[in-house]
Image (cartoon, grey):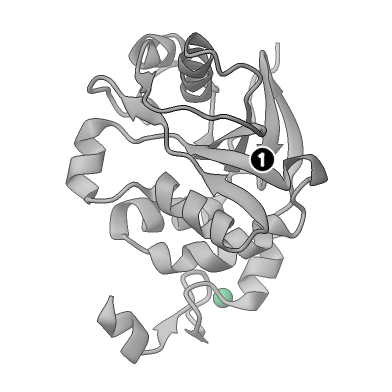
Amino acid sequence: MLLDILLPSPCLLCSKIGKPICFSCITKLQLKGTHVKLEPLTGLAFSEYSDETALIVNSIKEKGFTAALDSLAKAMLESWPEQWAVANLVPIPSSPENQRKRGFSHTLLWARALAKNSRGLKVTPILVSTKSRKDQAQLNPDQRLTNMAQAFTVKGQIKAGPILLLDDVLTTGATLGAAETALAGAGLKGASFCVFTRVKPRNTL
Ligand SMILES: [Zn+2]
């Protein structure tokens, strides 16, 4: 947005004038890739879900606060694992309704910000939503699985390199699971994932 360039914007988290999210607030988030197992997938979560990470995700998604993606991507890349230095980033597509409503895909923009600030990450948006679906946030774990069943299809190919699914929030893993099923069905096995923030399971039984 032109106004964002002309007028100094306040930091989303502390309102200090200067950057979309200021250096001190980014540092306080302590973004660091932590390994998460989500059978059959493994991946990284860069933060635990908190008031701050929720505000960041919602502002990007619902208010078009995409100017923050560059500094978030840079902070995530600081602890990026060596084995994914060269990888294909596959953003998880929003539901067709949300994509239409927002007019952009925040995970695609997130992938682009990561690729732009990296040496070897490539954006490969080969997952496509196949059906309308409900907002996962309002559903219980079983409903989430049903909601996400066959939610994605693969359009395109990946010839070489690790595949890394990219999403904003990890809750039960139903979305990532559905994405992995679609990829595996297209012969693309062995994908991993990375998410910006993870809601820790309350019940680990
Ligand atoms: Zn700040």
At horizontal 66% and vertical 13% (from top left) the residue drawn is: 40
Q: Quadrant of ligand 1?
A: bottom right
Q: Is residue 117 above or below residue 86?
A: below
At horizontal 48% and vertical 9% (from top left) the residue drawn is: 185
- In the image, 179: left or right of 148? right
Q: Is residue 46 above or below residue 164?
A: below
Q: Nearer the viewer, residue 119 or 48?
A: 119
Q: Which residue is mark 1?
A: 45
- The quadrant in which the C terminus is found is top right
Give residue 172's position: percent from left, percent from top.
Answer: 54, 22
Q: Is residue 52 above or below residue 159?
A: below
Give residue 94's position: percent from left, percent from top.
Answer: 33, 36
Query: Does label 1 point to a residue whose CB lies under 8 Å from ligand 1?
Result: no
Q: Is residue 181 above or below residue 103?
A: above
Q: Nearer the viewer, residue 108 or 24?
A: 108
Could you say which quadrant of the image residue 31 lies in?
bottom right
Give residue 171's position: percent from left, percent from top.
Answer: 54, 29
At horizontal 69% and vertical 45% (from top left) the residue drawn is: 86
Give residue 11's position: percent from left, percent from top.
Answer: 49, 76
Crowdedness near tag 1: few (<14), some (14–19) or many (≥20) residues, C-alpha within 10 Å: many
Q: Nearer the viewer, residue 21 or 162?
A: 162
Tag 1: amino acid: Ala
- Residue that extends furthest to the right in the rendered view of this protein: 82
At horizontal 27% and vertical 82% (from top left) the residue drawn is: 2
Could you say which quadrant of the image residue 107 lies in?
top left
Q: Nearer the viewer, residue 187 or 46?
A: 187
SS assignment at label 1: strand
